[in-house]
Structures are given as C-alpha cells and as structure tokens.
Image (cartoon, helix red, strand yellow):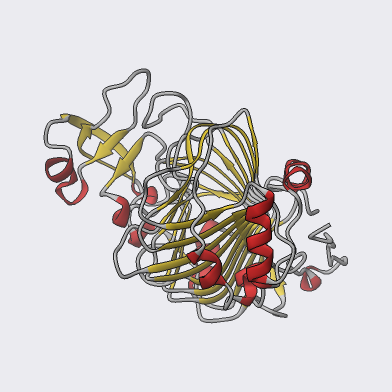
Amino acid sequence: MIWKLLLALTTSTAHVLAIGTPLGFGSSTVGGGSATAATPASAAQLLSWLADSTPRTIVISTTYDFTNYYGSTSGKICKPWTCSPNPQFAIDQNNWCANYQPSAATGTDSWYKSGTGYSYLLKVASNKTLLGKGSSAGIKGIGLLIQNADNVIIQNINISDINAKFVWGGDASERLPVTIVGSTHVWIDHCTIKNVGRQFIVTGYNPAKAITISNNIFDGRATYSATCNGKHYWVALFTGSADTITFAQNYIYQTSGRGPHIGGTSGYTQYVHVVNNYFVSVSGHALDSEVGAVTLAEGNYFNTVTTPSMAGTAGNEYFIQTSSDLSACQSALGRTCQANTLLSSGSVSRLNSAVLTALKAQSAVTRYSPMSASAAASYVQANAGVGKIN
C-alpha cells in the first residue's frame, strides 16, 4: 500500500499530527511541524490563525460556515451558456461580460461576497497544518488562498458550497476552494470538494512548486453547470510559470472537463505527474495539456470517460498504454512504470517522448513507485476523501 495510514492521537490535542507523508513533488512538506495543536473557538479565530506568522497545527472537528460572513451583494450578470436546464451564470466582474461574452443575454442577480476575490478568501500563511477530525470537519462558502507561502498542509477537510451558480472574471480572477500562488511545499490531502462555481484547485500564474494533491474527492455533481448536464466542468487549472505538481490517488467523478487543465501560457512550464487517479463518469475531457505542459500520465483508471485526454493541444504529454510505452518510460526513468486503463472510454494518442527526457532530472518522478491502474482504482475508491484516515 502506498500510504500506511496512522493516526498519531492521544487524549491530548497537543499530539495530533498530519497522517502519513506526501509522495512526489511535495514529499518534504511539513506544514506546522511540531507546533502544539489547537482548535479555534470561532470562524474569526480560524481566519486569524491561518493568516498569522506563527507556526500552527490547527485541528477542527466541525464545519465553519463563512457563506454570509462578509454579506452579499448584487449586480450585473450575463448568460454565456444557452443550454438547459440550469446553466451557470457569469458575474460581470472587471467588465468580463462585455469583453468576453458581448452577445450574451444580461440581467441582475445576487451572490455571497465570501466566494469572490482574494480579499475574501481564508489566507493561509507559511508553516501551517489544517487538520480535520472525523468526517464533518470543513469550511463552507469560502476558499483557501495559499499565496507566497512555504510549508502548508490541508488534510481531511470538506470544502463546499461556494457560489455554485456563478462563474466570473475569467480564469485569472477565479478564486475558489484552493488557490496556490507563488508558494512551495504544499500538500492537499484527503479533502472532499464539491458544489462550487469554478475551479476546485488553481495555481495562478506565479510558480507553485513542490506541490502534492492526493487522495482527494472532486465531486462534480452539480445543479448548475456550464454544460447543463449536472456535471461540473472546472476541476483543476495548473498554469504557474514553473509549477511542479504531483496529482495522485484522487477520485474525480461526475465532471465534464479540465480534470486537470495544464499550461496555456507561452514561456511557462508545468511539470505535472498525473498518477494513480480514478476518473469515472466524465462526460467531457479529463486531461488537457496545453502549451508549456510537461505531463506524465500513468497508472490512472478511466471508467466511462468520453475523452481521457484532449487531442490536438500544444502541450507535451506522455500517456502510457502499451508495452512499448512502458518500456520507453522505464528505460528513461529507471523504475517501473504503469499503464493507464481505459474502460468504456475514448481513445488517446498522446505520446511525446520529450516528457520522459525532461522528467529524468526530476527525482520526485524517478523515485515514485506507482500502483497498477486496477490497484489504484480499488485503493482510491476505498481511501479518498474525508473520514478515511481517522
């Protein structure tokens, strides 16, 4: 088993630790280290502790509801999607509707401020561990901003219900459940994210380095969606100028696109290892490697995925399927590689050997020991999300 799940708990909260250690790029992440654990007495104290300069281990066992913490506002919206039923709407932030959807119908609506903009997010400073106890720990109505920080662990947390009806401002302005910008050594593990407006996780444009995103559930079931099919389109967006990310052992289901989208800016490079994830019931595309992407996809299980990886995009991707693919990978990386499995899914033709050449120098990839795709599917279904490590 990749992870030996141990809970270091005694009768004293002071001895609570994060469970396991991250694999891949974020392997040296320690978060708050040995800081004495404590539980905030209120939402305001949680906000304060996350943002201060003190190394902390913060333990929560309930859901902190920030939905109406900053109140609500109203304004112009537009309707970029004409499908039915229940298309998402776009908030006209930064004149977005006029610039990008000038032909869309417009109107007015109201939304909660907590789900929009940097100023309303829970800012997470360096040397922080945020741990959830049990299966009910979480934050609601607001996201986390990890900006210019080093050493952050977010584990066993529910993040949900963030203005799910709306998108706004374009990708660079979307600040939703987890935003990692200009930060290093970040581990997002065993979280469950659902019912949000746009990206579940986004890295922004400044580099996000030494990042591991593992054992999470990305629950795409949605009332409002961009494609009106009850499935969330915006899963993850990795666009930093020098990202290094391990995306491993996650459960991505009932989505329709960007799971993840990697790259998109000329001159930027993202090294992303997509390994041992379980994708199921994805009506659009899973992987999308655009310009700048250096993506190795191995040991993933695609179950009823219309397009496991987008064809015709400009990024570099090595998607392992055949024995020949495996042989080339193993020769280049000097360790056992694993093929992806496609069940009731579309075909893939993404095999750029430049990925293997580039990743030879990345020990986070060459030292990784992936499971087979079938083992990963079983493991992820049994272990991903909140409440599985207590």
Question: Residue, x 70% and y 48% (percent of image)?
Answer: 386
Q: Taking 379 as reference, is 317 left or right?
A: left
Q: How many marks?
A: 0
Nearer the observer, 185 or 352: 352
Q: Taking 355 as reference, is 374 left or right?
A: right
Image quadrant in which you'd find residue 310: top left
Residue 54, above or below 281: below
Give the x, y percent position of residue 371: 76, 54
Give the x, y percent position of residue 216: 63, 50
For the N terminus, the quadrant is bottom right
Image quadrant in which you'd find residue 136: top right
Nearer the observer, 212 or 93: 212
Question: Residue, x 64% and y 57% (percent of image)?
Answer: 214
Residue 271, above or below 344: below
Nearer the observer, 210 or 8: 210
Image quadrant in which you'd find residue 67: top left
Task: Tell me if residue 45 can be seen.
Answer: no
Question: Residue, x 14% and y 47% (percent of image)?
Answer: 95
Residue 322, above or below 101: below
Q: Taking 293 as reference, is 110 left or right?
A: left
Give the x, y percent position of residue 99: 13, 45
Residue positioned most to the right: 10
Give the x, y percent position of residue 146: 47, 67
Residue positioned most to the top: 85
Residue positioned most to the front: 324
Task: Tell me if residue 60 can be seen.
Answer: yes
